Image (tube, helix red, strand yellow):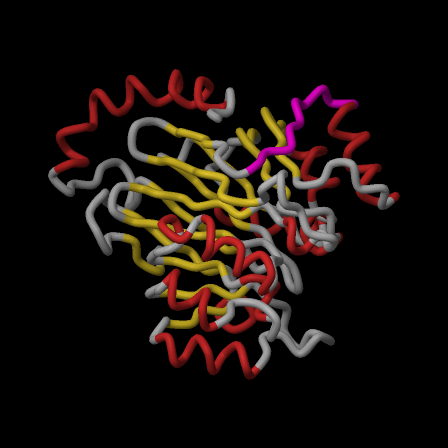
């Protein structure tokens, strides 16, 4: 299944890549330090990840709990005078993931909105859905196998949820996405727990081996299991978490598992927003800014 968003981005970037193809393949950079930025925004105890491609096209995964904080953090990394975000992906209807999106819609135009479990009856979530509809933004609920192709070299694949096998909890039905840019790969996991991890290892194991892992559920002890880390083998593990949060995230058990796996741990509560820059398509070209 290929989402219609593929057409949007294909038209936008086809000409750009025709011009820049030889430079990119040879590992050169142009105009700016990176072709791709993946920014794990410091929004406190929540998730918000900005994918900024060619400094022109943006995908936002989640919006954190606070609109003012989200606007402030986006203002530091969004291109000047760019008030459009092409795609927003909401992994699941929890406030610490969608709260900031209500204000986002007042400041930025959004071309397409993807959301997990848009049928949720949470009142605060339905207010967001109403606002999306008022602004006539197309909204879809993607499933495993959906793809968003942004040009020839950037690919985003939805690898969960599987609508044939949904779990009871919204966290476990989070949208999980894999991003590939040349030889570099990222996995964004929302708030999935061990049940979803086990399902992914069983059914999507060939898609889990990545360079960069967004640690699930802010570093909960009930996520990012040993078996999941054995499959993902990330060089870097990013934890989006609020300082001195009441949940005790990230859990010591989780930090120990990451330590044993050999992953370098990056935390938004310790280093502010984590900005990853990819200057070429070559392996290991993505670096923390």
Of residues 277 and 175, the one drawn nearer to the viewer in this rendering: 175
Residue in the picture at 34% in, 51% down: 277
Residue in the picture at 26% in, 41% down: 182
Q: In the picture shown, does residue 180 fall above or below 209? A: above
Q: In the picture shown, does residue 221 fall above or below 280? A: below
Q: Residue 191's quadrant in the figure?
A: bottom right
Residue 140 colored magenta? yes
Q: In the picture shown, does residue 252 fall above or below 34? A: below
Instruction: Classify residue 180 as left or right of residue 188.
Output: left
Of residues 10 and 229, the one drawn nearer to the viewer in this rendering: 229
Residue in the picture at 23% in, 44% down: 280
How far across and down, in percent of the image, does residue 125 sit?
80, 42
Query: In the picture, which quadrant includes the C terminus?
Result: bottom left
> What main secondary structure does the magenta stretch of the protein show?
loop
How far across and down, in percent of the image, does residue 120 sit?
80, 42
Which region of the structure is painted magenta?
134-143
Instruction: Classify residue 138 as left or right of residue 289.
Output: right
Of residues 99 and 143, the one drawn nearer to the viewer in this rendering: 143
Give the residue at the far right of this rendering.
Answer: 123
Instruction: Classify residue 133 as left or right of residue 150.
Output: right
Residue 97 colored magenta? no
How far across and down, in percent of the image, does residue 267 sit?
50, 69
How far across and down, in percent of the image, does residue 194 sit?
58, 65
């Amino acid at each position: 299944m290929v989402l219609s968003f593929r057409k949007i981005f294909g038209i936008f970037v086809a000409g750009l890549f025709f011009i820049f193809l030889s430079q990119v393949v040879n590992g050169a950079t142009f105009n700016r330090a990176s072709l791709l930025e993946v920014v794990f925004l410091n929004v406190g105890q929540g998730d918000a990840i900005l994918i900024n491609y060619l400094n022109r096209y943006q995908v936002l995964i989640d919006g954190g709990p606070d609109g003012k904080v989200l606007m402030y953090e986006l203002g530091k990394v969004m291109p000047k005078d760019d008030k459009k975000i092409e795609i927003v992906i909401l992994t699941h209807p929890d406030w610490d993931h969608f709260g900031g999106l209500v204000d986002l819609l007042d400041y930025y135009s959004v071309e397409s909105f993807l959301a997990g479990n848009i049928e949720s009856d949470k009142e605060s979530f339905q207010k967001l859905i109403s606002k999306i509809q008022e602004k006539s933004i197309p909204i879809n609920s993607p499933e495993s196998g959906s793809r968003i192709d942004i040009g020839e070299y950037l690919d985003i694949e939805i690898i969960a949820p599987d609508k044939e096998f949904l779990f009871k909890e919204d966290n476990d039905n989070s949208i999980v996405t894999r991003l590939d840019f040349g030889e570099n790969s990222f996995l964004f996991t929302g708030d999935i727990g061990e049940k979803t991890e086990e399902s992914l290892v069983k059914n999507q194991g060939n898609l889990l081996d990545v360079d960069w892992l967004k640690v699930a559920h802010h570093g909960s002890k009930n996520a990012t299991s040993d078996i999941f880390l054995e499959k993902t083998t990330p060089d870097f593990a990013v934890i989006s978490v609020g300082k001195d949060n009441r949940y005790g995230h990230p859990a010591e058990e989780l930090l120990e598992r990451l330590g044993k796996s050999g992953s370098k741990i990056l935390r938004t509560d310790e280093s502010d927003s984590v900005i990853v820059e990819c200057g070429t398509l070559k392996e290991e070209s993505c670096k923390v800014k």
